[in-house]
Amino acid sequence: MRARKKLSFQQTISVFWLSLLPEAAVCVISFLIALRVINDSLSIGDYSFYTGMMAQILSSMTVFATHMVTVYDNKLKVENMNAFTSKFNRTIISGAKPIQQIEQIEFRDVCFQYPGTSALILDHVSFTIKNKETVVLVGKNGSGKSTLIKLLLRLYDVTSGTILVNGEDIRSYRLEDLHRCFGIYFQNAPNFSFTIRENIVLNDDDDKNAASRIRDFLLACAGEDIVQACHGDMDTYLTRIFSDKGIELSEGQHQKVAIVRALYHDASCLILDEPSSALDPEAEHRIFESLHQVAKDKLTLLTSHRFSNIDLADRIILLENGRILEDGTRDELLAQKGSRFAELYEYQAQKFRNTPEQ
């Protein structure tokens, strides 16, 4: 930014002088010609000829200078792009070990703070998740749930401690292999203005049964409205940017498409970050019924603010201020005296118990 500010200042000064000096020169020359006309050294016709010629020269010089500035500006843009691509430093370094599926995940005394900050987002977090186990992370906003997922996907690396996958340091695995092991849904995950098929399959379009599989997943995830809107054609575009026959989806429908994208590739580990935030109650119930079936043979990690859908969980981990406050099954946590989970659970449960006054 300092370099761009300095360059912008220099450019402004240059343009100012390039504009001022020719105009000043024209004024001086016109004045001298006028004196010659007054002294009868030149005629009125000479004055008209010389001033007209100067106007043409000035116009040509201005156009030339403008084009030179444009050429120089484009040259700087190209140089900036080349410098960015050549000097870009990847902070997340891929390992060399291959991995095909995830059997176990362990966070061992993990601490994390975002670059350029001093606050600990995760503070000595330790837990283990095994295959065929479904764990739900709960806690208030800012407790570290989404950050924990970002570390597991190696969007960031831990500040201290270790994340182990199948007993090995997660940093030892090839990034591409590791990412293929995850079926991922992020809260407010975007969809692209491409076809439904392209949004779900992405760059893996070798499956000849893709259309029927996508349709089945949509129906299982309460997506009949999407199937009806596209008339069963999975090559229908989302939005009308690239096709006049494209369809516009609501926020909840976009969320269904993103959830199907996470389920479609049949990854060994499912990560779902607030998968029901924009869904109506019926769609939420049906999607979690489908997740219950899909997650039986997978390692599954969910985050949720709604305690109505935690029946899917084998375990619940409550995070608060970056620390694990409680860890156990729903019944165990509700039975604990002074349980923070029980307190948060009661906040939501009492809304369904209270009836309006008659």
Image (cartoon, rainbow, N blue to C red):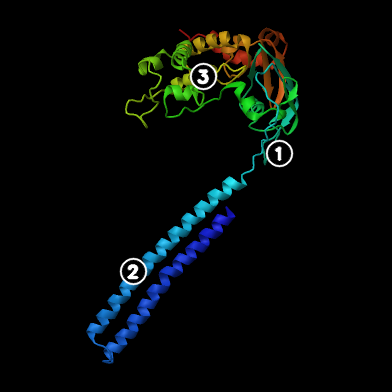
Front disc: 2 or 1: 2
Amino acid type, mark 1? Ser
Q: Which mark is residue 163?
A: none
The disc at residue 59 is: 2
Of the numbered discs 1 and 3, the one sitting upstream in the chain is 1
Amino acid type at circle 3 is Ile
Mark 2 and mark 1 lie on one chain; the one further toward the N terminus is 2
Position of residue 203 in the picture relative to residue 21 (left or right):
right
Question: Which residue is labeled 3 in the image?
Answer: 259
Q: Position of residue 77 (x, y in %)?
A: 50, 52
Position of residue 127 in the picture relative to residue 215 (left or right): right
User: Taking the image as drawn, is residue 267 in sight?
Assistant: yes
Residue linked to disc 1: 118
Q: Residue at x 55, y 8 (%)?
A: 353
Q: Residue at x 69, y 27 (%)?
A: 173
* Quadrant position of residue 296: top right
- Residues at marks 3 and 2, CA–CA distance in whole angstroms: 61 Å
**Foreground residue among 102 and 14:** 102
Relative to 101, does residue 95 appear above or below in the rendering? below
